[in-house]
């Protein structure tokens, strides 16, 4: 092998290593904050339970009157596409209103969106400051409590791709249904690398 080709190969390998070696373009590089939260089934899910899995996360709340509706609709659409292609990907929706969103409330919400709870989990069981910290530190997304006299939280509308090592690699527009095709393209590439 000529020296020029060797240098090119070494450069490419270094670039792949620096980018985590994933066959997708990323726009984030954040470690997922450790967590141990309560699911819609009143069981416990931790970040360690998701190790070795690719997963998509979002932030929602069940009495949201605006962005959560298309976001959860798109997560449901994404779940259908993941099933159609038989990909092993988990979906995790963190409630930003844990005081209202009890496991029972989240179970009802999951049913409204035809969620298959085998791979789509809804989380609660923490205080607002905890989810705010996760939103800011892991997802680089601000989270605000409702103004006085209102019950609508202000939160990000992205979906987040999290690697099997617990690194948040990429964010997507969670409100636009067309974005699910982009997510699926990335999932096909990374899920087949495992």
Image (cartoon, rainbow, N blue to C red):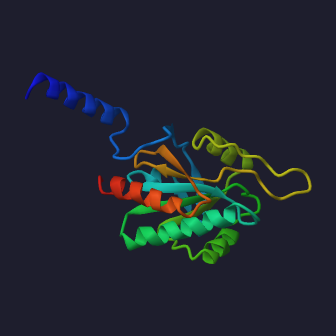
Q: Is residue 35 left or right of residue 103?
A: left
Which residue is rendered at x = 66% and y = 50% of the image?
A: 156
Give the position of the N terminus as an image quadrant.
top left
**Quadrant of the image occupied by residue 153:** bottom right
Front in this rendered view, residue 11 or 94: 11
Residue at the far right in the pictured view: 149
Front in this rendered view, residue 144 or 51: 144
Residue 40 can be seen in this image: no
Residue 147 can be seen in this image: yes
Q: Position of residue 91 (x, y in %)?
A: 51, 61
Which residue is rendered at x = 41% and y = 72% of the image?
A: 83
**Quadrant of the image occupied by residue 136:** top right
Which residue is rendered at x = 72% and y = 44% of the image?
A: 129
Front in this rendered view, residue 72 or 55: 72
Q: Position of residue 120 (x, y in %)?
A: 52, 66
Front in this rendered view, residue 160 or 45: 160
Q: Is residue 26 left or right of residue 122?
A: left
Q: Is residue 143 left or right of residue 165?
A: right
Which residue is rendered at x = 66% and y = 68% of the image?
A: 106
Residue at the far left in the pictured view: 1
Residue at the far top in the pictured view: 3
Q: Position of residue 104 (x, y in %)?
A: 68, 72
Compared with residue 183, is residue 83 higher up or lower down, i.e. above or below?
below
**Quadrant of the image occupied by residue 2:** top left
Compared with residue 39, is residue 6 higher up or lower down, i.e. above or below?
above
């Amino acid at each position: 092998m000529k020296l020029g080709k060797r240098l090119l190969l070494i450069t490419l390998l270094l670039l792949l290593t620096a980018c985590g070696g994933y066959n997708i373009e990323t726009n984030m590089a954040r470690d997922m904050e450790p967590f141990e939260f309560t699911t819609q089934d009143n069981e416990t899910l931790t970040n360690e339970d998701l190790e070795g899995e690719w997963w998509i996360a979002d932030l929602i709340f069940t009495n949201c009157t605006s962005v959560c509706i298309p976001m959860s609709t798109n997560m449901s659409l994404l779940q259908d596409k993941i099933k159609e292609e038989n990909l092993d990907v988990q979906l995790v929706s963190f409630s930003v209103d844990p005081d209202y969103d009890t496991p029972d409330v989240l179970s009802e919400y999951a049913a409204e969106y035809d969620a298959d709870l085998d791979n789509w989990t809804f989380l609660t069981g923490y205080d607002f400051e905890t989810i705010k910290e996760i939103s800011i530190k892991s997802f680089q997304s601000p989270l605000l409590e409702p103004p006085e006299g209102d019950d609508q939280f202000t939160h990000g509308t992205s979906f987040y791709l999290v690697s099997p090592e617990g690194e948040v690699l990429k964010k997507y527009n969670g409100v636009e249904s067309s974005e699910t095709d982009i997510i699926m393209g990335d999932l096909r590439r990374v899920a087949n690398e495992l």
